Amino acid sequence: MHVDLSGRLALVTGASSGFGRHFASLLARHGAEVVLAARRKVRLDALAAEIAADGGRARAISLDVSDVAAVRAAFDALPPVDVLINNAGLGFGDRAMEIEPAVWDETFAANLRGAFFVAQAAARRLAEAGKGGSIINIASITGLRPGPTVAAYGASKAGLIHLTRSLAMEWARHGIRVNALAPGYFETDLNREFLASDFAQAMLRRVPQRRFGDMQDLDGPLLLLASDASAYMTGVVIPVDGGHTVSVL
């Protein structure tokens, strides 16, 4: 997909691994200057060096999205961000009867509360500068359909999907587009062990395309939402799941 993001500043939260790492490298390859944000700065520094070696531009900042003061300080220290990938999050696989309050609170602090305040900080800077921009929230198909052992995670992602639509409605007048990707099951550090389980292999048979996702399957949708190709799209949630959400129950 030919997309030129030259001259744009993109910030990716949760960039130290998984989706975030992949998205940061992808945006850099398409010309954006990328701010890598996560708690594990050593990993970010290594990724920034890899991007630079590949001819891209990246800088690393340590950021815990659950710390609102730190989030606001980080955005105050940067120029307005043209593209925000709101990717940082946590996932736990506890059954609903076994979820502890601390696990519930930690999941929502990262996946929903943190995502909101990161988006808010980005939008404030854009509005102050009189610039438009694109915010892309990384949701999940578990926010669209329920599944076992993901009550807290799925509820937080359902909240993120509703938040996406609410922010899109409020911020359209500022030229700020807010959309979401809802990936299906992709192999990442968070779920690698789960996808190897007998349960996951049985679930795979209910995916119409009969496979889990490859990271490259997200490239086109992400670049669409990050670029002017989606200039008339806001409040949209795009599942990328091999048809999982339209499969029979």
Image: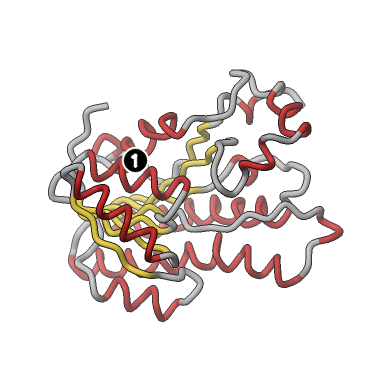
Quadrant housing residue 96: bottom right
Q: Name which residue lies at 39% across and 48% down.
A: 21
Tally the marks.
1
Position of residue 209 measured from the top left corner of the image (x, y, whole percent): 59, 18
Q: Residue at x 61, y 41 (%)?
A: 192
Split into 4 quadrants, where in the image is the C terminus?
top right
Label 1 residue SS: helix
Which residue corresponds to the image point at 63% horizontal and 28% vertical from the top-left? 244
| Relative depth, front residue between 211 and 224 | 211
The spot of residue 222 in percent (x, y) is 37, 39
Q: Nearer the viewer, residue 219 or 118?
A: 219
Instruction: Please name the amino acid that badge 1 sits on.
Output: Leu
Q: Is residue 98 left or right of residue 13?
A: right
Relative side of 64 to 187, left or right: left
Image check: 82 left or right of 122? left
Give the crowd class for mark 1: few <14, some 14-19, many >=20 residues within 10 Å: many
Residue 20 position, x and y percent, is: 42, 50
Of the pair 233 and 133, the residue shown nearer to us: 133
Query: Residue reaching furthest bottom?
Result: 69
**Which color scheme does this rendered protein use?**
secondary structure
Q: Would you say 144 lies left or right of 112 here?
A: right
Q: Is residue 42 above or below residue 24?
A: below
In the current view of this chain or complex, which residue is farthest to the top? 209
Which quadrant of the figure contains the N terminus? top left
Residue picked out by circle 1: 225
**Residue 94 at what x, y percent from top left?**
77, 55
Query: Residue at horizontal 24%, vertical 48%?
Result: 51
In this view, the residue farthest toward the right is 97
Q: Depth check: give the residue in front, 109 or 197.
A: 197
